[in-house]
Amino acid sequence: MKRLKVIVVFIVSFFCLCLGFSIALWISVFNHELYYYPANVYGCIDFAGYDLNQKRSHSMNMTGEWEFYYNRWIITDHDEGPMDAYIQIPGKWTGLKINDTTLGKKGYASYKTTLIHIPKGTRLCPTYQSGGGDSAYRVYYNKTLVGYTGTASKEIKETKNGFKMDFDSYYEVPDDGVVEVVIEVGMNHHGGITQMPGVITDGYSGYYQTFVSFFPSFVLGLIFFSALIGVCINYSYRTLSDRLSIFSMMFLLLIHYLFSIDMINLFRNLNIRTNFYLFQCLSFISYILLLRQLAGYVFRIKEVEHLKRYHKLYSFIGISIFILDVALIGTNVQWISWILLFLFTLPYYIGLAVGVIHHRKQSPYFFILFSVILDMGIVEMMDISEMIIYSSYGYEAIFCTILMSIVFFLYFSRIKDLNKGEVEHILFKQEILRGQIKPHFIFNSLNAIKNLYHKDVDAGDEAMIRFSKHLRTNVDALDHDMIPFEDELVNIINYVELENVRLDKPFTLLLDIQYQDFLVPVLSLQPLVENAIKYSRVNEKEDGYIQVIAYKKEDLIYIIVSDNGIGFEIEKIDPVSKGISNLKERFNLMLNADVVIKSKLEEGTRITITFQEKI
């Protein structure tokens, strides 16, 4: 059954990792077939045999091979000279060779293609994505200006980038069914058209604009409302130690979506000016922070604890990659920064995969969550690097909604575990007297104290005082969850002294306390001493001892209880040792601590408790 669960988790994770960019690639390769419009081949799009009355044909993306004229405006300047080259759109002219000259990022240009066999009278207008990015450009149909954005100029200082397509009216196709489309792009530093020039019919434009306006704003409202609910619920659980981490993940998801392509399109549709490259930088840094927050959380809950040294370097790595991304922004190799980010995040992903195989409780959920986040990043990288012809518009909304749902699922699962733990703790407190103050222990202790009085009255008085203090500690445990470690040590000392009074072979209690300024669950260490006596039989050995060590290293507190008894086989003892089982659950519930038990026959037992210091 466990093996089947592991297989299912890996299948789901693989599906989440590949789904987004697989769909994006599939749509890019088969976009003409899916939306039923012809391809742009050598500067010509032939609509013969295509019915533009079909819904799928109302919106057409003119991707493919366009005629390219570098540093030339063929309409404005009446330039009738030959083209310089064919160029793929979306794409950049950076790196293109013209007359033995390799083009850089800076420049202005004209793009030209011809639409033929369009039904007479069809009303067309350019989509607001023509030109792409933050650009200044003009769109002409048969030398008639039909749309523009910003103010295009041949001088960079005079060019004012636009953020939304403006057009006055629809262009009606003439009798010959031919429309020559020219896009004149103003001087820029990003090397051309990086999104899809498109054309839509009047039967589609209203629906298209409504969708562009409504969809991102709806998802933004949904994410914001979900985050608000999460915050309200979050702070109603004051004992939830990881509430800040979960809130940070929700907050970073919201921030990441605010700087996504969806929001750029929404702002432009509302006539709000945006800076495409600034949004791109902020989107990338928020993505790094989101990965950093998730990586830090899975490390803190000890799902990838073995990556401790690497985790300390991860923040520095993220900052370095962000600086590299800023340096490469607008170039043809910006994908390098994304690839590096994915590679440096891979150890966490592999660590969670190992956790799934080893059946760690939280690893499957975070393994799937990492898959979705990486898929989202891959789609963004493909969009920026022009590996897909469609922008990632809409993908961010879907990804962020899925991620928010997974985070909420993990969050409420944590609350469910917390509630369950609180109920179990109440039941434990009700049974603590029965579990800790055993009738035979009281009878044996009193009988040993009585015998001690016959030998030494002072020793009997001292033993009676220890007995009463120990009894009081057990009774008071019903009113306290956590007590200072120092008080717990006093209880152990009293318990050991009482045991030594009644045992034939006393043992020694050794204390090596280097740090004690912290709290522990009440009566949490006494079961370890009982374990040493009952199972490891420390009192049956010559010079038997139990040692308690406490120290702090960095931000972790270590409590070690060891003995030199005969040891025992853990797999035989652990299932029936209720005290040890309760101990593990209580330390995990109240301190999120690890409890590791190691025992070797004839050598003794060592129990190590590790937890993070609470500030």
Image (cartoon, grey):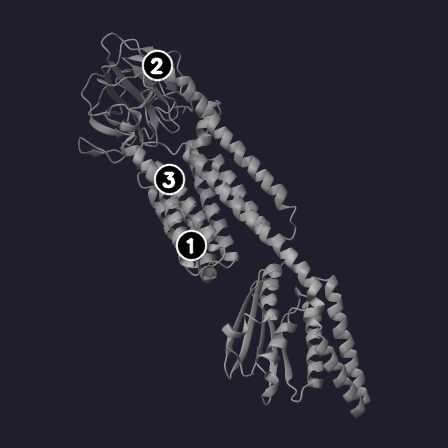
Which of pointers 2 and 1 indicates the residue nearer the eye?
Answer: 1
Residue 210 is marked as none
Badge 1 is on which residue?
5
| Quadrant of the rendered image containing residue 125 | top left
- Mark 3 Cα-neighbour bin, 10 Å: few <14, some 14–19, many ≥20: many
Secondary structure of the residue carrying numbered label 3: helix
**Can residue 381 be seen in this snapshot?**
no
Foreground mark, 2 or 3, reads 3
Whole-number angstrom distance, CA of label 2 to CA of label 3: 35 Å
Q: Identity of the amino acid at label 2? A: Val
**Residue for badge 3:** 20
Q: CA distance from mark 2 to mark 1?
A: 59 Å
**Quarter where residue 373 is shown:** top left
- Label located before the other in sequence (1 or 3): 1
- Under mark 3, the amino acid is Gly
Question: Which labelled disc corresponds to residue 146?
Answer: 2
Asked if labels 3 and 1 touch by Cβ distance under 8 angstroms, the answer is no
Element carrying mark 2: strand
Depth check, front residue: 417 or 609: 417
Which element type, helix, strand or loop, lies under badge 1? helix
Question: In which quadrant of the rendered view does residue 436 lie?
Answer: bottom right
Q: Is residue 251 among the parts visible in the rendering?
A: yes
Q: State the count of labels.
A: 3
